[in-house]
Amino acid sequence: MNKELTKNFASGHSACAGCAFPTIVRTILGESPDPVVISNATGCLEVTSTLYPYSAWKTPYIHSAFENASATISGVERAHKILSKKGKAAKKIKFVVFGGDGSTYDIGLQSLSGALERGHDFLYVVYDNGGYMNTGNQRSSATPYGAATETTPTGKESFGKVEMRKNMMEIVNAHHIKYAAQANVAYLSDLKKKAKKAFETDGPVFLSVFSPCTNNWKFPTSQYVNIAKLATETNFWPLYEIEDGKYKINWATEKPKELEEFLKTQGRFKHLFSEKNAPVLAEMKKIVKDEWQSLVNKTEE
Amino acid sequence: MCSCLPSQSDYNEEKLIIRFETTRLDSRRPLVEARQANVIRIYENILNNSNKKRIALSGGAAAAEALKQLEPDVMAVYPITPQTTIIETFAKFKADGEVATEVIEVESEHSAISACVGSSAAGARTVTATSSQGLALMNEILYIASGMRLPILMIVSSRALSAPLNIHGDHSDVMGARDTGWIQIFSENAQEIYDNTIIGMKLAEKVRFPVMAIMDGFNTSHCVENLEILPIEKVREFVGEFVPEQSLLDIENPVTFGPVALQNSYFEFKVNQEEAMDDVANEYLKIAKEFEKLTGRKKDIFEAYQIEDAEQVIILAGSTAGTAKDVVDNMRGQGKKVGLIKINLFRPFPRKEIIEALKNVQSIAVMERAISSGTYPPFYQDIMTGLFQFGEKKNMQSIIYSLGGCDIFAKDIEQIFNDLIANKISNEIKYIGI
Amino acid sequence: MTQYNKSEIENKKSKIGSEEGAVIKHDLKNAAATGDWRYMTPIVDKEKCTGCTTCMPFCPEASIIMKAYKSESTACLPAGRDKCDIDYDFCKGCGVCAAVCPAKAITMKKN
């Protein structure tokens, strides 16, 4: 076992072979200058890391429920505020929430919004795999347009999910927080920089990290890094940050790869390559292009 | 028709809102006045350093006063009528620098109790307060708080549940939470909610279970009554300092709260939790004894009023007990052997002790401010179970009254006793006040 | 179905009693040996490995460490650099390391 990498999150967890989130967790926590306390929403990370009698967490950790990880950390953070004043707790502790997209975009949105608005000093990390993977791949509001899930299956009259993804970064940014960034597990030095910046910023900060799911996106267990890389190279998942309201793109290329290169790596998009679904594919490409352009426009504002 | 029901013309949304807001405004005026009186009297108390000082407070303000005195580290709250008297009074204490408590104004009751779970797991003395829909919204997390053995204190100003919307008092909300693994203590009046807030905090931290200290919404929460309060240092000494066994902030000894426990361990954890619940009544009594030494006020798992030779007994909880005691006194004056049992500790339920007290009783009426839809209401169920278990065959009438703040009068209670005397007892639930 | 005898139940209960509220502590002894999941095993060709460490942080199990390696061959480059070494205790055999290795120094072999 790699000692340095497992300072906070050890081996022995039961995440699927080839899962992306252990790398996200270790990379982010590795950048904290202080001890960390974790609040984790119900989901894959939680169930695979705390299966009794084993906890993979070597740092204090709490899981309460699905939708309340941000409210939970609010309580921890305020408890720390008063107890450290009273000399009953260490002065410097960082507070981190990990949640999947279900607990961030959907069921935990209110709890997150409240905690951001109240200005608690914590880092919220969403590992975004675009759906409810822990319960067996149902659609969430982070599931991309056109993706097939168990609740948006393809069929005679269906091409998968009909709706666009929610723009979570915009929602978070609307809370006037000092720092929010979108990162990707394939770009670790970028992720590290963002985590470091997040830990250095006072008040609530937000990281949205692309986290491919081998099991439900249907790709070989060895491929999460390559697929994640394609997501950014095709502009499907741009790397950018919003610092004090200012947008900055962290990775761009003159010639982005064709979206198909990303889509064809995954079973959830397989149906898009039929003749019948050509308009869906075209629409998808348009969505990605428009979103990228809108992001570029924001950096120029 | 119940006298408190709005007339036909009130059944439109606009009027309903007006009624609602009027209640809020009216309810605050005596509170503000009581607060002013309160401040003066508290300083007098401190100067005199006496254990017995009488002041006038609403139930909500009395609970807030007790909270201020035991000074929680964290209080996470969300407004709901009729609980707001508590959090508004407390907010003023905070604004005046009288408490160091971190108050978290969350965006829902679900987040209030969730923040409490986080705070308590972080080793902070933690409190919250709610009512009705708020308690119902918290429901999921109530089980998590007790399953994690977190000593959170919650003041409940109990209120009816929607639909239809009703902001007034009954016990529907707390009854809906009776199986959540929380200790539940009912209070009759402002004095008792003050006392139970202090006792509840100490009990929670001693037995490591969350506690609900319950008062009747409006009947108690908004009624200004005389009560005795302790000097602040006596309360702090009584409750003591909270020293958690584990804490999220103990970074030298990292722990994991809330793991997954499957077929190999879940059942054992739950049984373990239940075994710990078995000790709660004893611990409650020990703390009540200590409290009695300090205040002279006797506290018990239930109050037996004129019960020794009683032939007819009413069992109930909360603010109706005051009226019922008056009725008992009057009827005793007429030579009728009636008595009252007022339930204080409802979870865990002191089945054996209550049945023991009922041994020589001929008939019983169990009065409740809640429906358990499709079956008998909660107190009745528990008492009937106890009677059967201990081989006591009694005639017992189930009565539901005062839902949604509907009034109950002394004459109604007298009628209930008279029906018991006349042996007018049936297996049908009686609804009083309709 | 597992059948427990009485003393087993008592043992279990006393363990759980000491973990009141289901608050537990990290103890690697309790970890599942996830190495048992493996049906493909990554094999590192140390001669090919350049010690670039690309694979290391991507391993979901943190099973890769960089270890000193003494080559017999003078062709092995760069000399004196630590090389990729896999701890198989927890390695689930996902093959991410092999997929990301720029030098193609890791191959997946069937067990």
Image (tube, helix red, strand yellow):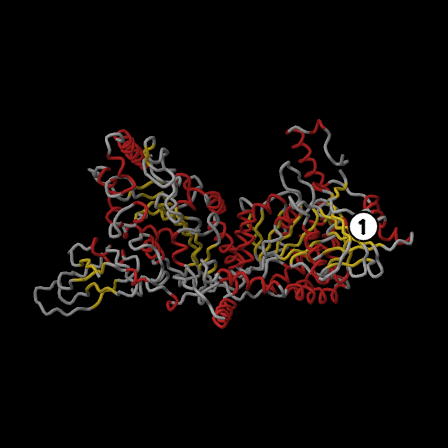
Please say whether residue B33 is visible from this viewpoint: no
Picture quarter with the C terminus of chain A = top left
* Residue topped by disc 1: B324
Q: Position of residue B27 (x, y in %)?
A: 71, 41
Q: Which residue is painted at 41% across and 59% down in the image?
A: A50
Query: Residue, x 64% and y 36% (percent of image)?
Result: B164
In the drawing, does residue B74 fall left or right of residue A33?
Answer: right
Relative to B306, residue B108 above or below: above
Question: How far across and how far down the image is residue B73, in percent?
Answer: 57, 58
In the rendered image, residue B292, in percent from the top left (x then y), is placed at 74, 65
The amino acid type found where label 1 is placed reads: Ala
Residue C5 visible here: yes
Q: Is residue B226 above or below residue A105?
A: below
Q: Quadrant of residue C68?
A: bottom left
At which x and y percent is residue A145? Answer: 33, 35
B271 to A275, vertically: above or below: below
